[in-house]
Amino acid sequence: MSTTPHPVRTTDYHTAGEPFRIVDEGLPAVPGDTVAERRALAPRLGPLDQLRRLLVQEPRGHSGMYGGFVVPPDDDGAHFGVLFWHKDGYSTACGHGTMALGAWAVDTGRVAAPDDGDVPVRIDVPSGRVTATVHRASGRTTGVTFRNVPTRVLARKVPTTTSLGTTEVDLADSGACYASLPARALGLDTTRTSLPALVRVGREVRAAFPEHDVYGVILYEELPDTAAGPRQRNVTVFADGQIDRSPCGSGTSARLALLGEDGRLGPGDTLTHESVADTGFTGRLLAGGVTEVTGATHRTGTHSFVLDPHDDLGTGFLL
């Protein structure tokens, strides 16, 4: 791609406000027998990583862009596999992306679906096999439920020092490792005006746990409970300071497991999880640490990107 204007076609969705850019054709060869193996190799595959940079960086993307390369599944038990990517590389899990991929698979006819009813789309991701159940009514997709790999609580109330003070942090692995802490404990809230401080704290907390390879830091705020269960709003800071516009799909799985261990979420209860963009997911905790997260996802466009060989910016830049 560095020498030819080869077009790259994508289909873009947003899930509760968080973008997801899907590439399913024209990919360079990605070696490996499983999606996890391909993800481990992806950063070292020059043409593939160049494509990631082209699609995530400005002027074609931005620092908050997210996407996925559709690859073969591990076996015929799944419909397809995916390599998730963002501005800093490749992630092991992405709940909002899984939900977008479920809708995309149905919208494109890759997975047949009824006009009314539900259809499961099984997807192999680096952390395992997940399912996006697409809900349909009157010929359109009305929502998607993401069933994640089992979530494990790793540690509770770990004292952690930040530039705003010391607080206690919980760790849970829901396909990726998330650190959770109450924003109010550091004098913050989860509004847009607090985003610079939340990003700074998120980076500091992530750096405090190198042994756990923390992917995302969830700064949450308690809201009044609903009749169905707890209600929270969060800002999830992941990778190197990237802000999730949605309530974070796999991050919601982490919150569900922690709330379950606290006794605040039982069978039949629902977490109402809100984002800084005023969008929402609902989540349920099932047996064995399995979680389900439901939300809305919508297509935002189809694109054909090119790299002009005479463009001095090349694959782009990030601010």
Image (cartoon, rainbow, N blue to C red):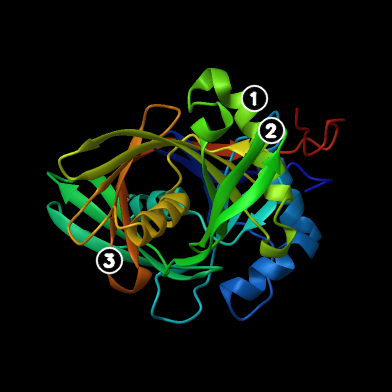
Q: Real-space Cα distance between discs 2 and 3?
A: 34 Å
Crowding at mark 3 (Cα within 10 Å: few <14, some 14-19, many 20+): some
Question: Residue at coordinates 78% horizontally, 39% vertically from top-left?
Answer: 315
In the visual, does 48 lie left or right of 254?
Answer: right
Q: Real-space Cα distance between discs 1 and 3?
A: 35 Å
Q: Which residue is mark 2?
A: 200
Q: Where residue 134 appears, x then y in whole percent?
A: 26, 55
Question: Residue at coordinates 33% horizontally, 74% vertically from top-left?
Answer: 288
Residue 147 figure quarter:
bottom left
Return the disc, 1 or 3, that comes first in the chain's sequence. 1
Q: Where residue 164 appears, x then y in whole percent?
A: 67, 30
Decide: is 158 above or below 6: below
In the visual, does 39 lie left or right of 261?
Answer: right
Q: Which residue is mark 3?
A: 286
Residue flagged by tag 1: what amino acid is it? Pro
| Residue 78 seen in the current view | yes
Residue flagged by tag 2: what amino acid is it? Arg
Return the disc, 2 or 3, that comes first in the chain's sequence. 2
Q: Are marks 2 and 1 in contact (CB under 8 Å)?
A: yes
In the visual, does 266 lie left or right of 27?
Answer: left
* Residue situated in front as seen by the camera: 109 or 50: 50
SS under mark 1: helix
In the visual, does 14 lie left or right of 44?
Answer: left
SS under mark 2: helix
Q: Which residue is mark 1?
A: 196
Question: Residue at coordinates 58% horizontally, 32% vertically from top-left?
Answer: 186
| Residue 87 seen in the current view | no
Decide: is 290 above or below 75: above
